[in-house]
Image (cartoon, grey):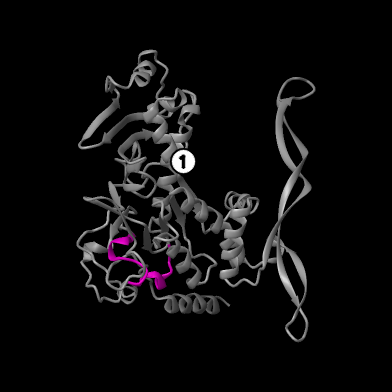
Amino acid sequence: MLVQFKIKNFLSIKDEQVFSMVADSAIKEKDMDDTNGVFDVSDNLSLLKSAVIYGANASGKSNFIRTFFTYQAMIVHSANLTELQEITAIVPFLLNSKTVDKPSVFEAVFIYDAVQYRYGFEVSKKGITEEWLFVKAQRETQVFYRDKNGIEINPKYKILIEIRDKKMLHNKSLLVSKGAVFNDEISTNILKWANTIFAASGVSGGAFNYDTTISMLQDPKGKTAVVELMKLADFGITDLIVEEKEGSSMGVTFGLNAAGSSIQPEVKHEKTMLKEVKARRNVLNEKGQIVGMANFVFLQNESEGTKQFFSLIGPFLQALKNGSVMVVDEIDIKLHPLLSQRLVSLFNSKETNPKGAQLIFTTHDTNLLDAHIFRRDQVWFAEKDKYGASTIYPLTDYKPRNDMNLEKNYIAGKFGAIPYLGDFDLLIKEVLTHKRAKK
């Protein structure tokens, strides 16, 4: 479960931004459906089940979502980097001369197996400059701290000390990533939590999302859940079938040419078994009676909205099943507003989200700005200043009243994070007039 996330000097984010999933104890939403979008972790800590981020195009929403992916990728994959490789995923804020050569900073506070961790690192393309890990029971204690002067490690973590003392760590690899390779328990826990961050994009969909849903269709319980949700979404689909067919995949290998003087690519097409999804629909006669069934190749015949819902529902169900953090960029692309609401409600509901899964997503769908769907502390905004730097801030900064119409006030610009549009009509008129004058 995510408690808090910090980011600094990454993509369009220049100054430190703090995003929190801690519920505001002062907020009591009487009208919100179900369980108020909150689950209690302890007597002193309640966390939000979901959070939404609004903002104009190019405000930094997608860049903020990318910080989660980058944080996860560094933890999971940095142990595989060689000392000579550049960390290409790290891109600092490039619109300020002081930040171009500075490292990016990532830090998450999270709970895994009932233990709270605070883990972060400072990194540039050239390598890790700082790394720290703290664990909290009654109070927060340091596991290790790493900087250019060395690594200070709590004496109880013998494996981490051995990695340091035997010089098994270079500046492209995180100590946590290397510790997990050698089965250090606390490092393994950090890695396991990082792997629970489930990423999806409403913009691109993609094979990753389709494959997740397809894999669920091959399990009886998973298939039941996916098919029932597709039925409830009113797509007219009665069943989904996965069939395997022979196909080919393209691979590229490199070798010396005949003269042995240069490297030449060689394209190979290899036979493989591909999984194809078919949607089953009822065939009716003129009286509306079912007289048969018809199968349609899903990716060829279904609407873009249907395919989008299909691509998201697998990752969503997996996140709910495992209590994961689900991060989605532009959840509303190609979906009807009511479908977006239903997807969000899966996380806000106690019945469908008993394991503390969390949903963080960006959207332009202002229909979701409703007290029946979100508490005021679940709403965030992204805005870019005149210097091109993004800021992430919560709705609660404006202290809105309980009865305020959030959608109306957001569109009116009361909370910022909207595009400030010029006079389109005047511009087009000037362009057309100029063209006519040229003729």
For the C terminus, the image quarter is bottom right
Dot 1 surroundings within 10 Å: few (below 14), some, or many (20 or more)? some
Query: Is residue 422 shown left or right of residue 297?
Result: left
Q: Considering depth in this image, is 267 or 131 the residue closer to the camera? A: 131
Residue 290 visible here: yes
Residue lying at the far top of the rendered structure: 166
Residue 127 visible here: no
Which residue is rendered at x = 60% and y = 68% of the image?
A: 231
Q: Is residue 298 magenta?
A: no
Q: Considering depth in this image, is 381 or 14 the residue closer to the camera? A: 381
Residue 295: % across, % down: 75, 65
User: Quarter of the image holding residue 175?
Assistant: top left
Residue 362: % across, % down: 42, 60
Amino acid at the residue labelled 1: Asn
Residue 269: % across, % down: 77, 39
In the picture of the structure, the residue carrying the numbered disc 1 is: 195
Query: Is residue 285 shown left or right of residue 161?
Result: right
Residue 230: % across, % down: 59, 65
Which residue is rendered at x = 39% and y = 18% of the image?
A: 163
- Looking at the image, how many numbered discs can be counted on the residues? 1
Q: Considering depth in this image, is 70 or 160 the residue closer to the camera? A: 160
Residue lying at the far bottom of the rendered structure: 287
Task: Determine the secondary structure under disc 1.
Answer: helix
Find the magenta span and give its range.
363-382
On screen, residue 189 above or below 230: above
Query: Is residue 13 shown left or right of residue 341?
Result: left
On screen, residue 9 above or below 367: above
